[in-house]
Amino acid sequence: MNIIIITGGSKGIGRALAEKYAQENYKVYSLSRSIADLQNVTQVPVDLSDTKVTHDTFTMLLGEIKNLPVLSVTLINNAGRLGVISNLENIPSEDIAKSIHLNTTTPLILSSLFIKATQQLMCKKQIISVSSGAAVKPYEGWSIYCTSKAAIDMMTKTIAAEQNEFEHGVKCNAIYPGVVDTNMQTDIRSTDEKDFKNVQRFIDLKENDQLYTPEYVAETIFTIDTQNKLQNGDIVDIRSF
């Protein structure tokens, strides 16, 4: 069977990915705080900002998967948060720590556990991380988000370099989904311009119907994945497909 594990699979892009892969007869696991109304998706409730709970829950899940007849296994690091939008000096320390933990520390932990647990599997193994153009373009007010996504890109490149040394290593890629019509975008558009100078651009994108739907992003990621369009370590923008 083909297995996919998605973080943050109850909302937005993560939910659309869970639904798409389930429709294509993948065995889908969603790791998320909330439970959604999803068909044929095994939902694992977990607070991904809690290191010990995340480690223990994911380790248990990987132990179950290793006993299944696996043809391919994929981890999609999707869960994330924007956090407080403002200049860095205005962001509370607790919010900085929470965003970096969820956006960067958790994907590193999950990727580490995933690689270790699947070392003996000879099938297709991969990690796909949902990154952002904010990884390479600085937005005033998004210092934490931009920093965390830049870290995801470097994580992707480094894992790929390490895994290239192994005959049955884990393929690692990151994807920029573009500007997507999710709850995060709603929060962005409601931000005061003094905290986020680019807010009008995102308002215009919504008003001009130029936002991607989560379903379109999920379809595109599925195609990129299943048609093996990427080399190990590639970081791509879905707008290039």
Image (cartoon, grey):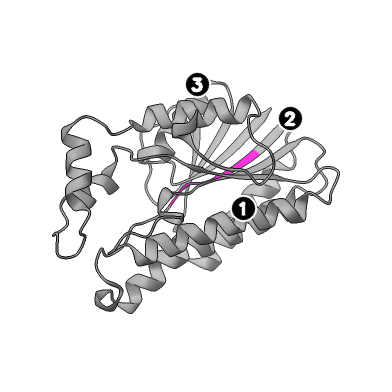
Q: Is residue 201 left or right of residue 148?
A: left
Q: Do the residues labelled 1 and 2 touch (CB within 8 Å)?
A: no
Residue at point 54%, 28% (across, down): 222
Residue 48 shows in the view: no
Residue at numbered disc 2 = 71
Residue at numbered disc 1 = 156
Quadrant hosting residue 155: bottom right
Q: Which of marks 3 and 1 is nearer the N terminus?
A: 3
Residue at numbered disc 3 = 23
Q: Earlier in the sequence, mark 1 or mark 2?
A: 2
Q: What residue type is labelled 3?
A: Gln
Residue at point 51%, 32% (across, down): 221
Q: Is residue 57 above or below residue 30?
A: below
Residue 238 shows in the view: yes
Q: Measured from the top left, where is residue 52 in percent x and y? A: 55, 67
Q: How many labels does the image show?
A: 3
Q: Residue furthest right?
A: 167
Q: What whole-number distance in Å separates the C-alpha atoms at marks 3 and 1?
A: 28 Å
Q: Nearer the viewer, mark 1 or mark 2?
A: 1
Q: Residues within 10 Å of mark 3 (few under 14, many from 20)?
A: some
Q: Measured from the top left, where is residue 213 in percent x and y? A: 33, 30
Q: Give the range drawn in magenta.
A: 74-79
Q: Is residue 71 left or right of residue 74?
A: right
Q: Measured from the top left, where is residue 197 in percent x and y? A: 20, 59
Residue at point 44%, 50% (across, down): 79
The kind of secondary structure element at disc 3 is helix
Residue 89 part of the magenta-drawn span: no
